[in-house]
Amino acid sequence: MTDRRGFLTAALRGVPALALGASAAAATARGAKAIAPRVVSTWDFGVAANRAAWALLGVDGRALDAVEAGARVPEADLKNHSVGRAGYPDRDGHVSLDASIMDGDGSCGAVAALEHIAHPISVARAVMEKTPHVLLAGDGALQFALEQGFTREELLTTESEQAWQEWLKKAQYAPAVNGEVKNYGARPGDMPGGKNNHDTLGMLALDAHGNMAGACTTSGMAWKLRGRVGDSPIIGAGLYVDNEVGAATSTGVGEEVIRIAGSFLVVELMRQGRSPREACREAVMRIVRRKPKSAREIQVGFLALDRHGDVGAFALQKGFNYAICDASKQDALRPAESVY
Ligand code: SD4
């Protein structure tokens, strides 16, 4: 019978092999530096998403599979009004979703303004793997999803519809800073009229084989114009991944991220030698330098993971959090530094 100390020793011995996976253990045996898998995500709800990703990454899974599995968690979470099924609608009451996925070898796929499909990240992956294209939008994206066997559903929940009806009373489009946290689990009665806005899950992963991948999924800015597409499905804006360097993703007012090709910029700055934190900071500062007045009124945050597993983030405003998960801790949540 194993005593407590013996049990703990045995358990600890088991952790690296299980956590790093067979290939990392084999690499260590060959004398090569083992790669410690890691997954990072935007916002508080990234913790739950990371856990789902870790279920694969922690047992030698592929980064691409991990980020898809992780992104599906907030997409299915009815308390999350910024991603997937329970996302707040556009100003006409339509829930329209944006998502992108990218592998470290440059393969990528995305959907924009997709309606009636609860898991846009999986449609994005199908675009990547089953078509010669990168981005499908609107009715064409829906047609493709249905042809691929995805189920057509009504995504507007009763709560989201009530929130939309509340917004219609004033009908002012005024994205709230950090609405993504304030709105998590919100009920219509909790919300200040006309102020609620949203967020996105951006997730980046490094697997034990040294491959990276990223996923980004959102219902976009609440009460947006019908047809509006943000940064999240735009490769290079909301997401960019390159095995040679690292990966980046963004959250916040997508128009500002598109204007600076934000995630591509962060990865290129890392390629030039900046740390993930410094690269994210410089991307945020470009927004500040271009729009010093309006930058005070909006939120944009970047999150980056380099190929060694180093993580960094930076935001315009306080309140942007990111979740980190690796073999040592699966539910870490850190506040990002910010300009203001
Ligand atoms: C967008 N970047 O559609 C997304 C939404 C978001 O905080 O992240 N909001 O612009």
Image (cartoon, rainbow, N blue to C red):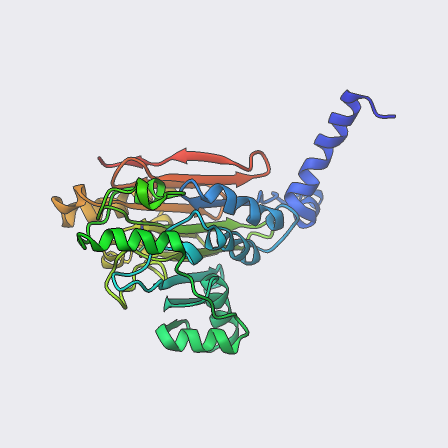
Q: What is the quadrant of the N terminus in the image?
A: top right
What's the residue at 22%, 55% (across, down)? 168
Foreground pick, 212 / 226: 226
Report the quarter where the C terminus lies: top left
Q: Residue furthest left?
A: 293
* Residue 203 in the image: above or below residue 310: below
Q: In this view, does 26 lie to the left or right of 172?
A: right
Is residue 242 toward the left or the right of residue 220 in the image?
A: right
**Residue 326, percent across and down?**
56, 40
> Residue 117's spot in the image, x, y percent?
45, 66
Q: Please give the name of the residue rendered at 42% of the width and 40% of the height, measured from the top-left corner.
A: 44
Specify whether residue 277 is in view: no
Can residue 149 be seen here? The reply is yes
Question: Which is more toward the observer, 222 or 15?
Answer: 222
Q: How many marks?
A: 0
The front one of 268 and 288 is 288
Q: Indicate the position of residue 41 as horizontal and vertical percent values.
A: 44, 46
Extreme residue toward the right, this view: 1
Q: Residue 112, located in which quarter of the rendered image?
A: bottom left
In this picture, is 63 found above or below 319? below
Asked if residue 101 is positioned above or below residue 38 in the image, the reply reads below
Horizontal and vertical percent for residue 150?
A: 52, 70
Within the image, what quadrant is residue 94 found in? bottom left
